[in-house]
Image (cartoon, grey):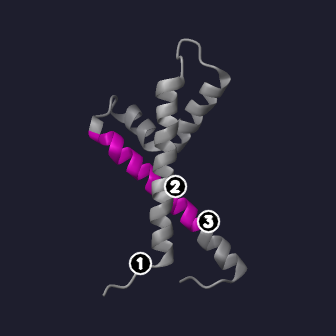
Amino acid sequence: MTTPLPFWVRRLIAATFCAMLAIFGLYMFLILCTDWDSPTPFDNFCFGVLCLVAWPFVVWEFMVGEHPSIFFALGILTTGLFWAFIMELLFRWNDRRKGKTLN
């Protein structure tokens, strides 16, 4: 019988998947629902948020140019892990501030 993963690992995995789904959903919204000939202010805002959140894509575009298809999946995973680690750091900082022990 194996021991279950610690709570913080399960929380990190869940946050990674949630971030990946949110980024993919925002990306698909912009691809499917935006008229790039006359974008609305909401479309411009969503594009700015996507550029901020999905920073590996922006860095790759500046360095190399067009990205291969496999980079899309790896970029989403990298971005999800990055934001999950940021969330985990905030949770741990909050727990330490309140004096809770980590399990």
Quadrant of the snapshot with the N terminus: bottom left
Q: Is residue 39 left or right of residue 98?
A: left
Q: Which residue is mark 2?
A: 83
Q: Foreground mark, 3 or 1?
A: 1
Residue at 59% x, 18% y is: 39
Q: Foreground mark, 2 or 1?
A: 1
SS for dot 1: loop
Q: How many marks?
A: 3
Q: Residue 70 appears at what percent x and percent y?
A: 27, 41
Residue at 65% x, 76% y is: 95
Q: Residue 9 appears at what percent x and percent y?
A: 45, 72
SS for dot 3: helix
Seen from the viewer's position, the closer of residues 37 and 28 is 28
Q: Residue 10 appears at what percent x and percent y?
A: 46, 70
Q: Is residue 85 left or right of residue 92?
A: left
The three-letter amino acid code for the residue at tag 1 is: Leu
Marks 3 and 1, the one that precedes in the sequence? 1
Boundaries of the magenta span:
70-89
Q: Residues within 10 Å of mark 1 (few under 14, many from 20)?
A: few
Q: In the image, is residue 69 above or below residue 76?
A: above
Residue at 40% x, 51% y is: 78
> Mark 1 and mark 2 in contact (Cβ < 8 Å)?
no
The three-letter amino acid code for the residue at tag 2 is: Trp
Q: In the image, is residue 46 above or below residue 101?
A: above
Seen from the viewer's position, the closer of residues 57 and 41 is 41
Marks 2 and 1, the one that precedes in the sequence? 1
The numbered dot on residue 90 is 3
Residue 18, visible in the rendered structure: yes
The three-letter amino acid code for the residue at tag 3 is: Leu
The numbered dot on residue 5 is 1
The numbered dot on residue 73 is none
Q: Is residue 22 left or right of residue 44?
A: left
